[in-house]
Structure formats: structure tokens, C-alpha cells
Amino acid sequence: MNSAKFRNWVKKEILSSGPISLSNAMRAALTHKDFGYYHSKKIIGSNGDFITGPEISQIYGELIGAFLGYIWEHSGKPSNSLLCEFGPGLGTLSADINRALSQIYPNFSCSPLHLIETSKSFRKIQKTKLKKQSVYWHEDFKKIPKNPVFAVANEFFDALGVDQAFFDGINWRQRLLNFSTKFEYVAGPILNETQIKLFDANHIKNPDKGTIIEYSPKTDQIITEVALHIKQFGGILLIIDYGKTNQIGDTIQAVLNHKPAEPWSSAGDADISHWVDFKSIERTAEKVGARFIGPVSQSHFLTQIGIKQRAQNLSQIDNPRHNRAIFAAVDRLISPAHMGNLFQVGLITPTGKGFPPGFEV
Ligand code: SAH
């Protein structure tokens, strides 16, 4: 069991330096080489712990491909462009993007594909799935060439971990993870000025005692790098994730076999994630001089870029079973009862005006 190894790791960390930050604990639970969840087998898909947009229907990736192509065309078709995906999982999204692009923008579809992926087992799966393309893997974004980049991140930022702080009635304090006889949260030091800024805590008017707020240091770091790159060299980053537009509330959650689980006691064996704070992403992107558009709901985005028309085109006369499956998948992606409203879509671009398809209101 990975969860026992995670528990031992936490205990050791606490012995040497005291209770640990939640983002460090989340990152270890997902990526540690001895017990990290992402090194285990079969986690995404209908037999795994969770299913994602690209795994629900090929239409998802095809529409995103058409979207990237449209933006590429309207940026003057730069011939040195790169495609990029953050956390590609099974590689399905990049494969579907490529299939759509090769039909509508064949030149663009031949662009080198740069994948940001830390997990060796996922890299292996991606290598097989994407063998027709020229693919480069990186541990982080800093290594990618200084060219216009057309990047997507689907359910990536929710895996980067968050820190939490809480209001004790007078001050904001860090919320840390401890283990005595079981996992428990304990109060850490009072937030310093820098941390107050990062959590954007001063903008919360009259917080109730016990209010919890979140901040993801790793998200901030990656968005800073990507937004700077986009500002300097052009391109976009399309972000799709379980999202919110403020920092308030405890959103750390775990899923095991499609069911909610207690995060820390199942860590290593369960997927652990948090809701992405799109306002914080917007602040970070704008701080370095890039533009942030959105977020809009996944339902709004996919409907506006033509999910219903595409489903109609794929349906076949005389094949009601096939058609039912297509429309059930579309429903899962856009209906508010499923992913439609929980998932949010945001876009980082260089400075500019106007709204691309998907983001018009
Ligand atoms: N985008 C895919 C997979 C989502 S799972 C889909 O929607 O189906 C998250 C992915 O991000 C996995 O591929 C995981 O290995 C990768 N990942 C998680 N943390 C990462 C990190 N810090 N750096 C790079 N990749 C990471």
C-alpha cells in the first residue's frame, strides 16, 4: 500500500522539521518516486480512479485542436510554432488535437510537440500513443525553445498542490499537516507580509473566524514562466480545470475508484487534487504583462466552438447505438449536472483586445 509509505514519509518529515505544508504533502502523495500516485498503474479512464474530458469523447480534443488552429491562423501562422501539453496523461488529448489539425491546418499539425510530464509511466504510454509526431519531453516548461507556443493544460493545475491558511479571529495563520495517532491539521505561524500578498488575504472583507484560504505556489511559478514566454515569443495557454474564482474554502479532495476518499489516509493510493483558482492565475499572468481571458464554463466554451454540430456530423443514419453514445458523451461534457459548470476554461495570450470563439459572452 502506498498510503502506509506516505504515512511513514510524513512522520519522518515531521520528526526532522515539524508539521508540513499541504502543498508539499500533496506533491509527495502524487509524485514521490517510492509511493507517488502517478507512478501507479491505470489511474485514468473508465477502469481507473477518474475519467477526464479527452477520455470521454474524441470530440473534446478535436474541438480544442480546431481552436488552437484558429488562434494560430489569426496570429499570422508563425512557421516556427510549437505545440505543447502540460500533464498529458494517456496522450489522448494531444493525439486528437493532431488528428483534427492535420485535416484543417496540415503545416501547423507538423509542429514539434513538447510535453511537460514528470511521470515515467505516463511518458511510456504517451510515447506509444503519439509515435507519429516529433515529441520532446520535459520536466518543466523552462526548457522549451523560445518560439511561439500553442499550449493546453487539461486537469493539470489541479494536481500541483495548494497551501492553506485560516483566520484565527485576529491573524491569518498557515494550516499545516501533522500526524500524532492520526492525520490532523495544526496551526502554523502567522502569515508574513509576503505570504499575505500571495494568498491575497487583505482583499477578504471581515472574514469569519475559521475561514480557510488557498494558494498554489507551483501554479504561480509555472504561470509566471508561461505568461512571460507568451508575452515575449507569442502563442497561448488554454487551461481547463475544476475551478473557482476566489481563494476561499478548503477544496482539497481525493478520489479512489470513482468515489470520494479522505485525502491523507488514502494518499498515494487515491488521486488528490484541489480546485484551481482562476483569479489567482489571472493576477499572476497580468503581473508579467500577459493577458488573461475568462474563465468561462466548459459548457459555454465547448458549445460556442461547436460541440453540438460536431456530434451531429459524427452521428450516422441507421446506427442509433453509436449516436446515443455520442450524445451521452456530449451531455457528460456540457450538462451542468456533470462537467459543464464545474469545469472552467481560461486563456493566457499576449496583450490584445477582442475575444476568440469560446470566450465571447
Ligand atoms: N491531462 C490528462 C491527465 C491529467 S492527470 C487528462 O486530462 O486526461 C495529471 C497529469 O499531470 C499526469 O500526466 C501527471 O503525471 C502530470 N503531472 C502531475 N504533476 C506534474 C508536475 N509537477 N509536472 C509535470 N507533470 C505533472
Image (tube, rainbow, N blue to C red):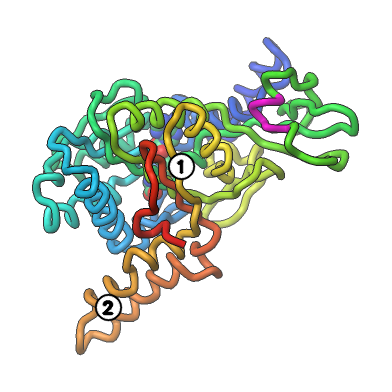
In the figure, 55 relative to 206: above or below?
below
Relative image position of residue 355 (x, y in whole percent): 39, 53
Image quadrant in which you'd find residue 172: top right
For the point 29% across and 80% down, the residue is 323
Q: Nearer the viewer, residue 215 or 358?
A: 358
Main structural element of the magenta stretch: helix, strand or loop?
helix
Residue farthest to the top? 16
**Label 2: few (<14), some (14–19) or many (≥20) C-alpha neighbours in 10 Å:** few
Quarter holding residue 275? top right
Q: Is residue 108 magenta?
A: no
Q: Which residues are magenta?
A: 196-201
Q: State the quadrant of the N terminus.
A: top right
In the structure shown, which secondary structural element does the residue marked by tag 2 occupy?
A: helix
Residue 52 vertical placement versus 190 (above, below): below
Circle 1 is placed at which residue position?
A: 292
**Amino acid found under the numbered disc labelled 1:** Phe
Neighbourhood count class around disc 1 (C-alpha, 10 Å): few under 14, some 14–19, many 20 upward: many
Task: State the residue at coordinates (55%, 49%).
Answer: 243
